[in-house]
Amino acid sequence: MRMKSFSCRMECCLVKAKHYFRLAAINLSRRKISVLFNLLFLVSMLVLVILTFSLSAGLSKFVNMTMLSVSTRTLAVDYNPNQFDADSVLATLETLPNVVATVPPGSSRTGGQIPTLEDQAQGYNGRITFIGANEHTHPPVISGSGLGGSSNTGVIPSKFIPTSVPAEATGGYIDGETLLGETITVEYYEHDYSDMENISRGQKHTYSFQVIGVYDSDNLLDHENIIYISYEDVGQITLASLGNHDQYLPSDTNSVQVVADSNENLMALQSEIRAVGFNARPIAFTNTSFAVTIVGIGAGLSLLAAIVAFINIIAASVNAVKERTSEIGMLKAIGYQDGNVALIMLVETVLLGVAAFCMSVGTAAPVLRYLSNHWADSQTLSVLLAQVSGNGLLFASLAAIGVPIVGYLFALDKALKIPPSSALREQ
């Protein structure tokens, strides 16, 4: 008997729910123009919210990756070789505070080929880049140990791709940790720069180093084929590739590099270098404020759209109640209580919010997919791969219901004050 009673109550509730939804749908269909305008403003706001949340995550990651690069805290120091030599300039720079490394000419970057990794079937061409470093200037090591000043040792990326082609094109990568303790031999060639219009390749040289550490390449930009070795080794490779003719290094205004201990101290170090008589300039232009600007613009537009949506929905909801005075009065006259009227209006509000949320996701997702596909081929921009943010969806879903609810509350107050006799007066 109890089961039958429960079943009857459930059936009754379902019938009532269908009835309320049908009335809500009919009422919304009568106000098509007003509802479309409400949806337009609400969807615009929600799309901006989803895009702002979704892109801000990628932009934050991009900023963090950029600031981890040693180039963002490196200054080039120019000097006149007729007045100074590199050794005296380096000696002066080493005495300054906040300095963790000084880099002689030709000791910052070079390259070579790893013959044993030339495997066209896998997409590897063996090309790698050496960057000079010490324990303070290479990325944090996640396995093994860092450079301690020893020659012929190196720190390699965790996802090692010895090629200039992105990982997506190679179909894979070499796990850097599997090479710990291994000795890798790199080939490079001597070049004759005596005739700058006809530079010729000469004798082949080799350089061997032992892999002593691995850094996390996922958190850095363009590091899949970058290996960190000592500044001295980079300088020797550079000089050998020039046929030991150091006159082919820049000679009109020579330049050395100096690395600060942090990005925050870079400008202070630049001032200190200028105070001792040298010109210093950043080697990398790192304007990360654009990321904050984009997020700020998105947040501002979202707020503006929210304000417009609030005003429009409140005005439309109140106006709808005025237009439906006779209808609401009639519902009360035939026995509908205030709670019933409130429930019908609430269902209308929820339907509006759900429709707006679905439309906003359907609009934002293709935009993010397009950006993701557009950026995927770039090693630098691939970190900005756009994905629908979970936080963005949560916030958008709350806003999709919350904004119409505000309009509902304003309209409900007026609707509940309408007496049953309004139906007769309107007639």
Image: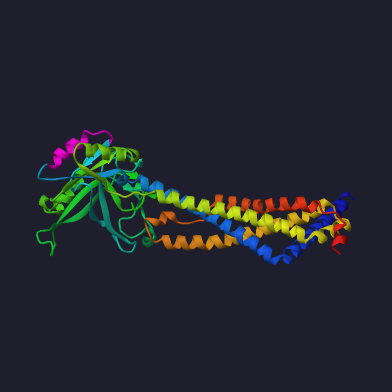
In this rendering, position of residue 295 left or right of residue 416 = left
Is residue 117 something that shows in the picture?
no
x, y (%) of residue 405? 69, 51
Q: How is the image coloured?
A: rainbow
Residue 310 is a magenta residue: no
Q: Quadrant of the C terminus?
A: bottom right
> Is there any visible trace of residue 217 in the rendered image?
yes
The image quarter containing residue 425 is: bottom right
Of residues 184 and 379, the one nearer the viewer is: 379
Q: Main secondary structure of the magenta part?
A: helix
Q: Relative to 344, is 214 on the left or the right? A: left
Residue 91: within the magenta?
yes
Magenta-highlighted residues: 84-98
Q: Residue at x 72, y 65 (%)?
A: 31
Vertical order, 286 against 370 (above or below): above
Residue drawn where x is 72% and y is 58% of the image: 319
Q: Residue furthest right?
A: 1
Give residue 172's position: percent from left, percent from top: 38, 58
Q: Position of residue 276 (x, y in %)?
A: 20, 36
